[in-house]
Image: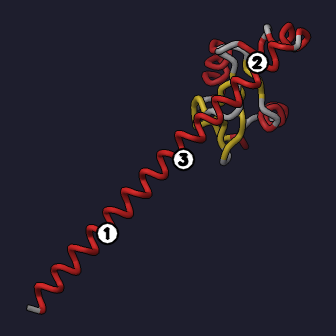
Amino acid sequence: MKNKYGIGFFAAAIILMLVLTGAYQLTYYKARERAALEKEETREEEKASAAETPDEAVAAEGEALKEDAYYLMEVNGYVVVYLSDKETPFEYTDIPYDELPALLREEIRNGKYIESTEALYGFLENYSS
């Protein structure tokens, strides 16, 4: 009799853990989806406000809207390539930041701008081991 209660308690504990895990996962995915929608709405608002003012629209037609612009930045001692938004990592490299020339380290610390994919891969070829 005692064994039946033990098995029942154990089964109830497992079911409770599964329910809590499922609820956590559901909440997590809903929060991620909501954050992604808010980020997308913010970007759309920024694009709309930039298009409304003629001076900014003319200035934005150049390099700022190119899809293949990149930024090199230092993360945890290594060079990381980010997309033009400076938030989305494009490629993690094995190039040690400390082994680069001082002038290049200064540029990367401030976010070195790379205009094209060809220039990016040229840089990576030159500094990769």
- Camera-side residue: 5 or 56? 5
Q: Position of residue 31 (x, y in %)?
A: 54, 47
Distance, label 3 to label 1, CA atoms, is 23 Å
Numbered disc 3: secondary structure: helix
Q: Is residue 109 left or right of residue 75?
A: right
Q: Are marks 1 and 2 in contact (CB under 8 Å)?
A: no
Q: Position of residue 45 (x, y in %)?
A: 74, 25
In terms of image quadrants, where is residue 60? top right
Distance, label 1 to label 2, CA atoms, is 48 Å
Distance, label 2 to label 3, CA atoms, is 26 Å
- The tag on residue 16 is 1
Numbered disc 2: secondary structure: helix
Numbered disc 1: secondary structure: helix
In terms of image quadrants, where is residue 2? bottom left
Where does label 2 land, which residue? 48
Residue 48 to residue 95: above or below: above
Q: Is residue 39 left or right of residue 2?
A: right
Amino acid type at mark 3 = Ala
Label whose residue precedes the other's in the sequence (1 or 2):
1
Where does label 3 land, which residue? 31
Q: Residue at x 31, y 69 (%)?
A: 16
Residue 46 to residue 101: above or below: above
Amino acid type at mark 2 = Ala
- Camera-side residue: 108 or 15? 15
Q: Are marks 3 and 1 in contact (CB under 8 Å)?
A: no
Residue most extreme to the right: 55
Badge 1: residue crowd in 10 Å (few <14, some 14–19, many ≥20): few
Badge 3: residue crowd in 10 Å (few <14, some 14–19, many ≥20): few
Residue most extreme to the bottom: 2
